[in-house]
Image (cartoon, rainbow, N blue to C red):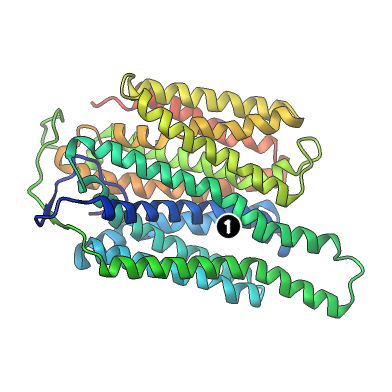
Amino acid sequence: MAGGFVSSNAPLNTTGENKNYTFALSVLTSLFFMWGFITCLNDILIPHLKAVFTLNYTQAMLIQFCFFTAYFVMSLPSGYIVEKIGYKKGIVLGLIIAGIGCLMFYPAASIRSYGLFLTAFFVLASGITLLQVAANPYVTILGKPETASSRLNLTQAFNSLGTTIAPIFGSMLILSVAVESIETLSGMTAEELAAYQLTEAAAVQNPYVILALVLFVIAGVFAVIKLPVIEAATPTEASGSSADDRASAWKYPHLILGAIGIFVYVGAEVSIGSFLVNFLGEKNIAGLAEADAGKYVSFYWGGAMIGRFVGAAIMQKLNPGKVLGIAAITAALLVVITMLSSGSIAMWLILSVGLFNSIMFPCIFSLGVAGLGKHTGQGSGILCMAIVGGALIPLLQGFLADSIGIQKAFFIPVICYLYIVYYGYKGHRIV
């Protein structure tokens, strides 16, 4: 198992007589919620750390660079680890590593080290990568094969629930403290400044210590509960797949183009989310304080949650390639109009992009692994590694934001969405 996602056609078997998986699915769903929650907190920490360390946008985007680079670096090693110790132990280990990453925020804030913060982000994301590699196969096999897609959609919806709640949580516990302190920063005595620094550090420390404790508790739960054992089965051709003898998944052009699609999709989604707080703080947009702007980020990720429920119903009747193309065209137009407008129009248009992002990942992923047959697992790994787009594209947009301004730099996501339009209408075709 090389990748972070497994299609419903993956060659997996379970052993054991117990077929009541309700409790196991419920606990697994908590994992999707947690890693969505933690990932989206980056959008809140970016403006906070940008202010604390007086960073430019390029430097601030190193947060996403370190976080999403872990997906690229750790995806294959995580697959190897899971093969050696098993999926259940892989989940436990992933939770522990993620918890350690959260704990690293405490000393990073205490000594005010941006480098240590970046290291903490990489460790945290490494744990989440291992979680994804280990957890997704369970969802596909805990129940009837014909309802596997439904279970995956449900768990992804809870992932989006985590991304929706996280900005509110982060704004209340992190940004609100920082804003209140910054407003009174001028004119402080040395003692008052020292007290401010302690308060500022605690704004990051306490939430991540709480998250670490929650992750460790969940790890303990997984260590003691019984889950079905996943065994490798003889690879077979998926139903309806092309019966050719290609040596590996790399020989399928539609998969490679799909990996590029995942790269640009994740990059565009993360780029927009990363800049939202600062963008909504612009005087010509909304002029919001960071704590208030952070709460509006929930609309962006909440749209993705709603869109996944709606998209699951729509794609039962419509071609996923066409749905993908329409969503990408709409997202591109919304971002273009955002670049050309101001005030509440620009604000609500950029927030609404999340609704159309919602169906892109499952569409690109399903189209990318279609027809791979025995190479489905390898194809899944390739697509998972492409999530590194979330590391590189925000960094590029940060560089441009420093050069031409935050609003004009949004042309980067526009280019990403235009590629996805191509993939939805033509690039996904199997040749």
Residue that badge 1 annotates: 62
Tell me: residue 142, above or below residue 412. below
Residue at coordinates 72% horizontally, 64% vertically from top-left?
A: 52
Q: Position of residue 421 (x, y in %)?
A: 44, 25
**Residue 38 in the image: above or below residue 372:** below
Residue 18 position in % (x across, y down): 13, 55
Q: Residue at x 24, y 39 (%)?
A: 148
Residue at 48 percent of width and 34 percent of height: 306
For this rendering, which residue is in front, 357 or 36?
A: 36
Q: Quadrant of residue 135?
A: bottom left
The answer, for residue 3, to whether it is visible in the render is no
- The quarter of the image holding the C terminus is top left
Alpha-carbon neighbours of circle 1 within 10 Å: few (<14), some, or many (≥20)?
Answer: many
For residue 223, side relative to residue 204 (left or right)? left
Relative depth, front residue between 101 and 400:
101
**Image-quadrant location for residue 16:** bottom left
Query: Position of 296 compared to 139: left or right?
Result: right
Q: What SS does tag 1 mark? A: helix
| Residue under the point 53% across and 73% down | 104
x then y, percent, for residue 230? 16, 56
